[in-house]
Amino acid sequence: MGDKFAVGVDLGGTKILGSVVNLNTGRMVSTSKKKTRVVNEGLDLVKRISLVVADAIDESGMDPSKLAGIGIGAAGMVDREKGILLAAANLGANDVVLAEPLKAQFGLPVKVGNDVEVATLGELNFGAGRECNNFVCIFVGTGIGSGIVHEGRILRGGSGTAGEVGHIIVDNDGLVCGCGGYGCLETYASRTAVAKSIVYDLGRGMDSVLRDKIDPQKGILRSKAISQAVECGDRVALRAIHKAARYMGLGLATVINFYNPKRIIIGGGLVEAVPLFLELAEEEARRRCLRIPAKKTEIVQAELGDFAGTIGAALLVR
Ligand SMILES: [Zn+2]
């Protein structure tokens, strides 16, 4: 039997990435990319996705009828049965029917999943989760998301929300979180939290190489800029990383104590760009969690990087 192929689409807040992926090897045969939103262009989200899919298929040179289907990993809440994107704050979209129109256009089965779930599937099959049937994947970005793999399958929980590591409460009287609660892990340990901490220190007059690299209104700072600042010993950047990593360690300790995974896989731009973040978080986690799992739990970096989303999305079809 020959290899099977599917289209994987990573539908993110800023860009839509599409690839034809070999489902047997996890290798991408082609790639295509578009911005998620372009002001005044008048193309809706489904149309933009369909252009990315068509481009990816074109570039692969494959006959569309030979493909197993289209998988979409969306940054938001989804209805997997109906293939609907229910709510996605970063996409500014609600109740978008994705599966049906794409199925009609391409004549292929279409599966829709959440971005963290598909990235976890990617790591499970072709990344740092290979040959491990019991692990937690944690992705640090604008927020903190995670996927739990239990006995080789994704654990969804009683109502489908399992793995909300970003909302583990680490401070009783803490900062307000996007979820409406306060003191949640992601308000202390996400890339957004690191940027906020840097903006705060700059605002109170601390000197930093990051002063002209950050947009103080939006607090947007690229992982690469943080990494360069850390490498040159910038005090503001180091303070922010130390603080965020310490909280991340508390979150990891909770995950370890509660679920006792064999392995924790951590990914996201900040984790890749700033190795110190994971080092410090791991140190704190092992110091704070129970003695036996502290010795046994493996903590490793995710392997698929930016491609976890497209490779994992394609796997939804399998
Ligand atoms: Zn929260």
Image (cartoon, helix red, strand yellow):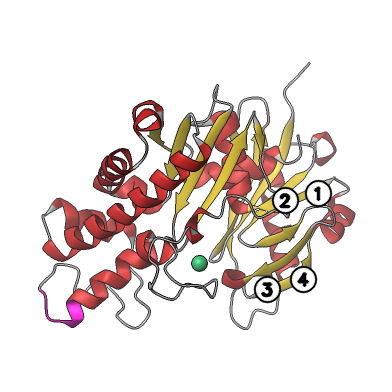
- Whether label 4 touches label 1, CB < 8 Å: no
Marks 3 and 2, how far apart at CA: 25 Å
Q: What percent of the width, then of the height, locates residue 113? A: 70, 51
Helix, strand, or loop for circle 3?
strand
Q: What percent of the width, then of the height, locates residue 22? A: 66, 31
| Residue underneath mark 4 | 95
Q: What percent of the width, then of the height, locates residue 134? A: 56, 30
Foreground residue, 23 or 88? 88
> Who comes first in sequence, dot 1 or dot 2?
1
- Magenta stretch mostly in which secondary structure? loop
State the residue lying farthest toward the top.
Answer: 1
Q: Quadrant of the C terminus?
A: top right
Relative to 167, residue 302 above or below: above
- Whether label 1 touches label 3, CB < 8 Å: no
Badge 2 amino acid: Gly
Mark nearest the camera among 4 and 1 is: 4
| Residue underneath mark 3 | 93
